Amino acid sequence: MTADELLRRSIGGEIVAIGLAIAAIIGNAIWTAGNDRRLRSRMGTGRRLLLAAIEAPLADDQLDLLQRLGRRIQIRLLAELAPSLEGEQRAALSDLADRLGITARATTQCHSRWWWRRLYATRVLTLVDAGEDIMPALIRDPHPLVRAQVAEWASQHPSPSLLLALIALLDDTKRIARFAVQDTLLRIGRPSVPALIHALGTMGPVGIASGLIVAARLGDPDLLPLAVSFADHPAAAVRAAAGGVLAAIGGDVAVEALHRLVADPLADVRLAGARGLGRLEHWPSATVLLPLLSDPTFPVRREAALALTAMGAPGSLILRTALRGSDRFAADIAAQALGAERT
Amino acid sequence: MTAGDVVRSVLVYLDVAILGYFLIVNTFYATLLVSATIEMWVHVRQVRGESRWRVLGSDVAPSVSILSPAFNEAPTVAASVGALLGLRYANLEVIVVNDGSTDGTLAILRDAFMLEPVHPISDRRLHTASIRSLYRSKLDPGLLVVDKDNGGKADSLNAALDLATGDLVCAIDADTLIEPDALQRMVRPFLLSDDVLAAGGTIRVANDCLVEDGRIVDVRVPRSIVAGLQVLEYMRAFLFGRLGWNRLGGNLIISGAFGLFRREAVVSAGGYTHDTVGEDMELVVRLRRHGYENGTATRVAFIPDPVAWTQVPESLRVLGRQRDRWHRGLADTLWRHRRLMFNPRYGALGLVGYPYFLFVELFAPILEAIGLAALVAGFLIGAVDLSFALLFFSVAYGYGLVLTFLSMLMDELAYRRYRRIGDRIALIALAFLETFGYRQLTVFWRLRGVVTYLRGRRDWGVMDRRGFARKAS
């Protein structure tokens, strides 16, 4: 084949590709324009039926009508309505999904070898609040998005065994899974505390630090002994995270542990200690923070200054002492903090 | 051998060289196209049926600081800031930097958001023009306003970075509208991988789209042909180019209009560079380079979802200046980071990304201009067979057209933002105009950028802005 021929064939190929692309774009535009109109009408019908379904079970003819709308529209309608329902109405919606065969199909797809099918199936089961038989097993799915989705589902199904499995994911290698678990534990709230206490004692540093972030937001007093013990943990990330929990709970024992953190050799831990004392506005600790105004790292100095500001008059006194002192770092941060205080 | 023979030989060798270049570049484009298609396929499956309200309402979602420089933006600043505060994200902080405006921008902000002076403690890790005062809004404590002496966009962004407290920072341009759920989408790559340093999304052309309360409510193809041509350019650059680079690991650009970065990484790397016109690209390259050198995060993720809308130039004069500046920025960044070239220490960045941007993006206009000149010269002295040359250039430009149409198709199937059939037909017509006429103009502008860079020009040039079309009440 000569070069000319090759080029001519290439042009021919390009013309065909362009023609096909244009046909596909225009064809899709025409099809979707028509489909949009049909969709609007079918969505309207579907919405009416769904609203009727949450009041009372649908009659067979109504169910047939809903069935004829197609699976995609049914799921779209459920996705619209489900987030704003709870209790009996949500249960009615789950029942409807079951009658429409959505739950059964999603359950089957949970066994798929393809992650995207399992992911979509778990999302559908979360939406319709079903899947008690299959979802707990997927908490160990190889794909992180599936694990994260199961964690989201678990917030509505917090059984003790599932909670333990969830907490085990706090040291998951993928952040999306850790994030989903943290979020779920926060949504579950206080009922997750016993499982958290039980599981954190046996986990590695990543899992513990991740769990302590949840514990700090829960602020449950039952977590205090755990937080105090983690304030002496060999891993700095754990000690720093423990500071957050101690600050959320407060009390003499917590303050004592925070004092240990303030004297820690690592900056992040000292910072957490200072932040904790500031959050508690524990003015008797003002003198403990004085040395931190001369800390070699700026974030620690800033946190100490902010904590002293939060402590009111005793803190201001310490800041003024630092302002007149010989340490220029302490004087600088004190000046900035006192400027902030004057506003 | 006569002088004519020498010229003929040179032209023949030049033709062969350009043919080789063309083959290599197009093979790479094909690879990018395959990569972009796979990425889109995976992305569509990852987000199918997803409910983003979880990130929206979560206490443990990463906090985000939006950095918005403003210089003489009095007519639009209140609406823009209002729209930023209205973004759907839980842990959000907005830092507006009044960069020495002389038109009352600060007074408008003060009135609209009930600002009161504050004194946050900062170690000023990034040096900027002098800061006059700081204000926090009484209406929304998430709004911090920095009033400073004029120092330019990079300087303003650095001032905001110094005060930002979010895990992630998002730099935006004043003439950009952000989709309400853009942050929820953009945070996702950071949740999916710890190795992500920065994330960008698709930027769309906002000219002639209808805007209501800072949101695009009706997407239209611009009436201006110049702006319309840029719709296609943006579509191709984002959906085919940057998406394709996701898998190949060589993404070097996050649009200055809207990008999300790890704050600590940006501050540690020294923030934005003042003395370049391509500060967006320079920052990304520097961040990635630092990541490789320090063994920290190195990946730049791109999500194909449309996240922001921007006004593009509508006159050839202004567009020419913009492209000239972009190309100078590219040249400057590549020169500053020349150590990356084929350096295995920098992984895909040094071995694939950098060489591509040098040989394809920077040199392409030079080679295209040489090719066109050689064609004319060769034809005039009878050294080039005209029919072969025409066939060759038809294949070259036709390939570009194929890529444009495939990007349009990808957009049509995945997003379908242009819903009128007339808009699609207009885009198809514009695609032909872009290939035969507009593209040659951009070659000229980019070539001019190389020349002006070599002559040491570093200024931005004047950019006119038209404002958004508001929906009639």
Image: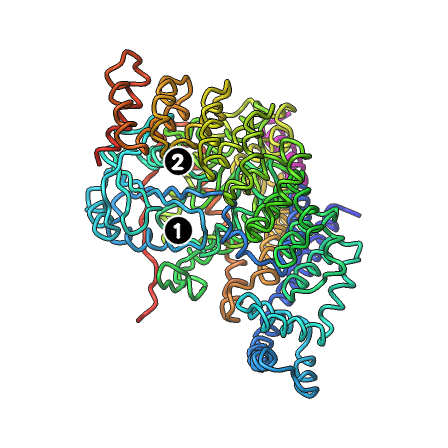
Subunit that carries the residue with mark 2: A
Mark 1 lies on residue: B176
Label 2 or label 1, whichever lies nearer to me, is 2
Mark 2 lies on residue: A280
Magenta span covers which residues? B1-26
- Dividing the picture into quarters, in which one does residue A22 lie? bottom right
- Relative image position of residue A94 (x, y in whole percent): 66, 71
Asked if residue B21 lies in the magenta stretch, the reply is yes
Subunit that carries the residue with mark 1: B
- Relative image position of residue B19 (x, y in whole percent): 66, 39
Q: Secondary structure at mark 2?
A: helix
- In three-dimensional space, the C-alpha distance between marks 2 and 1, rounded to whole angstroms, equals 42 Å
Q: Is residue B154 left or right of residue A66?
A: left
Asked whether residue A41 is in view, the answer is no
- B147 and B75: which is toward the camera: B147
Asked whether residue A334 is in view, the answer is yes
Q: Residues within 10 Å of mark 1 (few under 14, many from 20)?
A: many
Q: Residues within 10 Å of mark 2 (few under 14, many from 20)?
A: many
> Residue reaching furthest front?
A252
Q: Are marks 2 and 1 on the same chain?
A: no
